Amino acid sequence: MLTIAVCVGSSCHLKGSYEVIARFQALIRQWELQESVELKGVFCMNHCTGEVSVRINDDPAIAVPVDGVEEVFRQEVLPRLGVS
């Protein structure tokens, strides 16, 4: 099971964390990966200076803009699941 954690703390909330979550949810459904991906909201990852903070599994947090969710999904999520 791959875990995608999206920060929903104050700073990330203002930057669009709930839209990031919605976009990840849509992509997970589109690719029928509900059994392979856990998507969850978490509080501060201490990475507040960039865009919305996202952590995949236990990797360091990355800054993901709302319009960058699909790119992150294709580059970081699908390959880890062996989906091309």
Image (tube, rainbow, N blue to C red):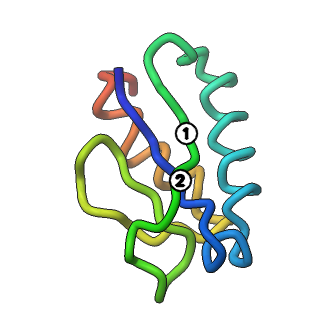
Residue positioned 67% across, 55% down in the render: 20
Q: Nearer the viewer, residue 65 or 53?
A: 53
19 vs 79, left or right, is: right
Query: What residue is shown at x 30% (from left), y 41% (from top)?
Result: 57
- Determine whether 24 is above or below 33 in the image: below
Q: Quadrant of residue 25?
A: top right
Q: Secondary structure at mark 1?
A: strand
Q: CA distance from mark 1 to mark 2?
A: 6 Å
Task: For the residues labelled 1 and 2, say whether their Cβ atoms are less than 8 Å apart.
Answer: yes
Tell me residue 6's x, y (percent): 53, 53
On the image, the x and y values in percent for residue 68 come to 58, 63
Residue drawn at x 74%, y 45% as measured from the top left: 22
Residue carrying label 1: 40
Residue 15 versus residue 53 in the image, above or below: below
Q: Secondary structure at mark 2?
A: strand
Disc number placed over residue 26 in the picture, else none: none
32 or 8, nearer to the observer: 8
In the displayed structure image, the side of residue 25 where residue 71 appears, left or right: left
Vertical order, 12 against 38 (above or below): below
Neighbours of disc 2 within 10 Å: few (<14), some (14-19), many (20+): many
Q: Earlier in the sequence, mark 1 or mark 2?
A: 2
The residue identified by callout 2 is 6
The residue type indicated by label 2 comes to Val
Could you say which quadrant of the image residue 62 lies in? bottom left
Q: Which amino acid, by three-letter code, is at mark 1? A: Lys
Density class for disc 1 (Cα within 10 Å; few <14, some 14-19, many ≥20) is: few
Q: Position of residue 4 (x, y in %)?
A: 45, 41
- As drawn, 49 above or below 51: below
In this view, the residue in front, 37 or 73, is 37
| Residue occupying the far left of the picture | 59
